[in-house]
Image (cartoon, rainbow, N blue to C red):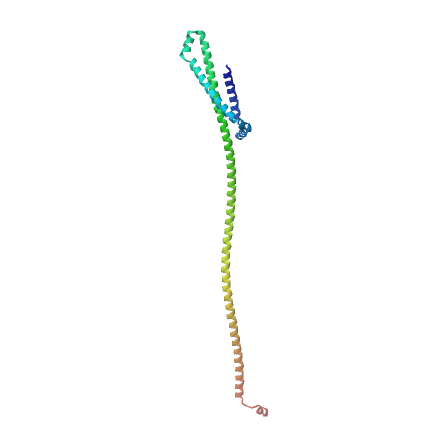
Amino acid sequence: MTLQWTAVAFFLYAEIAVNLILCIPFISARRWCSVFSWRIWNWLSPYWNKGFFTMIMVLIVLFLDAVREVQKYSGPEPMHDAKVNPNLYDNVHMKLFRAQRNLYISGFSLFLCLIMRRIVTLLNQVAVTVENSAGLQAQMDSAVKAAKRHQDDNVILFCAQALLDEEKAMSVKNQQLKLEAEKLADQVKVAGEAVRKSHAEAEAMRRQAKGLAQEYDRLLTEHHQLQNPQSPADKKDQ
């Protein structure tokens, strides 16, 4: 294996290891996001992007070269020469095997490179989504607490309104009772005036009856005197 394909093979092994590490289930996306946010990655990001695109271009070139080699050694002419010259048969198959091996190495390296970049992007997106969902959950919890607090306030206001309506009804009823009490007081006053007036009339009638009785007694005395006209001197002589 030449130096370039040895480097591609080591790059493939490194990609497999990195992808396996990124797919470890007990490391959360937020942890990976915190790792990706280190300052060293920000410092290496310009070089990383250039190196990534350079590696992609190199892998594409090597992949196309491997495709060309596979087509070259799998064509009819090398196989015809291998059949004509038996000593060349093993050499052609060996070169075809190497070309296919290089094709698989470069192809899988290119594929895993794209997969690795996609995994990193998805991990960042998942971490951002988790943070946003946590923020939304906090906002939802605060909104639920605010709604519950408003509901409690509405219940308190409803109770206060009910008490206020009851107080208003009691006030109206008390006002009506007060008016009725005033009417009854006026009626009692009028009845008292009538009672006093009746007492005065009764007293006047009693006095009038007393005067009539005295007048009757006087008239009765005078009547007896008229019935017995004898003087007291005559009564003495007898």
- Estimate the x, y position of residue 132 in percent, counting from the top left: 50, 35
Front residue of this view, candidates 90 and 157: 90
On screen, residue 136 above or below 119:
below
- Estimate the x, y position of residue 238 in percent, counting from the top left: 58, 92
Kindly tell me whether residue 139 is visible in this rendering.
yes
- Estimate the x, y position of residue 55 in percent, counting from the top left: 49, 21
On screen, residue 136 above or below 36:
below
Instruction: Point out the residue furthest to the right here.
Output: 236
Residue located 46% across and 12% down the image: 95
On screen, residue 12 above or below 94:
below
- Estimate the x, y position of residue 104 in percent, counting from the top left: 47, 18
Residue located 52% across and 40% down the image: 142
Front residue of this view, candidates 124 and 42: 42
Number of marks in the rendered image:
0
Front residue of this view, candidates 162 and 211: 162
Front residue of this view, candidates 171 and 32: 32
On screen, residue 180 above or below 48:
below
Side (left or right) of 100 relative to 31? left
Residue located 53% across and 77% down the image: 207
Kindly tell me whether residue 23 is visible in this rendering.
no
